[in-house]
Image: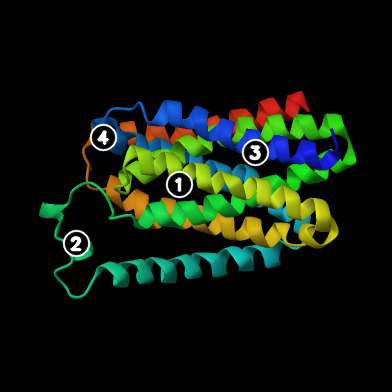
């Protein structure tokens, strides 16, 4: 097989496999588990941002200030995008997004789901670039990189599924949107194969926007919902699951580092 063929196979198979395995875990969760497991999703998002995405962006850029500026701009951009989503659904003060807490149905009417899909698509695009760069360097390196990306994506994709369910999407919609988002891996791989030198310069910017979207979703959309349950038992449960989400990313990074 040619290098391009291996890139296509690894990108397509890697994206779909990680989504399928994550879906198997997340979509079999009972409905009343979703709000509880959102805490795990918060930890997985923040862990992915601060333990993998931002360090990778700093490494590729070499300019911490430029990456930090991209993240800052990205957070402001996602704030504006969320406002646009609200405006789309609201024609007055009596819309669902302005509902009082007594009428809260446990989801955010699709806002955090939209944000996370945008960020996940950016991240998958960069994964495709990394797979292509590895295969163009050495076949074994490409294979190891593809396996590493699959292993890394699973805990994050579980979080994405849970966020979509929490955001009001059906299980079928969550699966379809995650599968479509995974196609960005193939797109990134193909573009990188034909224009690797040019695309590599985009990696810090793309990673910066991916990090911004995940930070925004975790801090602005998901964490405030946890404060609706201030009792001690719920708080301990939430903190424990957030820590578990972070730990899953951390242990994945350690295992991949040892394997490499």
- At mark 2, the secondary structure is helix
Nearer to us of marks 4 and 1 is 1
153 in relation to 211, above or below: above
Q: Secondary structure at mark 4?
A: helix
Please name the residue shown 27% across and 67% down the image: 89
Picture residue at 26% right of the left edge, 34% below the top: 234
In front of the other: label 2 or label 3?
3
**Label 4 to label 2: alpha-carbon separation:** 26 Å
- Disc 2 designates what residue? 96
Tell me the element at label 1: helix
Q: Position of residue 97 (x, y in %)?
A: 23, 63
Callout in the foreground (3, 4): 3
For marks 1 and 2, the one nearer the N-term is: 2
As drawn, the label of residue 12 is: 3
Instruction: Judge whether 167 appears above or below 250 on screen.
Output: below
Residue of label 4:
234
The residue that label 1 is drawn on is 177
Numbered disc in front, either 1 or 2: 1
């Amino acid at each position: 097989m040619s290098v391009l063929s291996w890139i296509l196979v690894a990108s397509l198979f890697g994206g779909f496999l990680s989504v399928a395995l994550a879906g198997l875990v997340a979509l079999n969760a009972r409905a009343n588990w979703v709000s509880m497991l959102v805490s795990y999703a918060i930890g997985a998002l923040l862990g992915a941002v601060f333990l993998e995405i931002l360090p990778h962006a700093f490494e590729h850029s070499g300019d911490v200030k430029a990456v930090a500026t991209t993240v800052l701009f990205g957070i402001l951009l996602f704030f504006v995008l969320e406002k646009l989503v609200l405006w789309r659904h609201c024609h007055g003060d009596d819309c669902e997004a302005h509902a009082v807490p007594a009428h809260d149905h446990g989801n955010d009417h699709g806002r955090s789901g939209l944000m996370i899909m945008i960020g996940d698509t950016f991240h998958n695009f960069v994964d495709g670039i990394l797979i292509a760069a590895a295969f163009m360097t050495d076949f074994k390196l490409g294979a190891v990189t593809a396996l590493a990306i699959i292993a890394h994506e699973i805990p994050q994709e579980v979080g994405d599924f849970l966020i979509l369910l929490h955001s009001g999407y059906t299980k079928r919609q969550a699966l379809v949107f995650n599968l479509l988002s995974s196609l960005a891996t193939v797109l990134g791989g193909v573009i990188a194969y034909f224009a690797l030198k040019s695309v590599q310069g985009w990696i810090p910017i793309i990673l910066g926007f991916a990090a911004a979207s995940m930070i925004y979703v975790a801090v602005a959309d998901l964490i405030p919902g946890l404060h609706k349950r201030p009792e001690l038992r719920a708080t301990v449960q939430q903190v424990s699951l957030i820590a578990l989400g972070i730990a899953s990313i951390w242990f994945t990074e350690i295992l991949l580092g040892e394997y490499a």
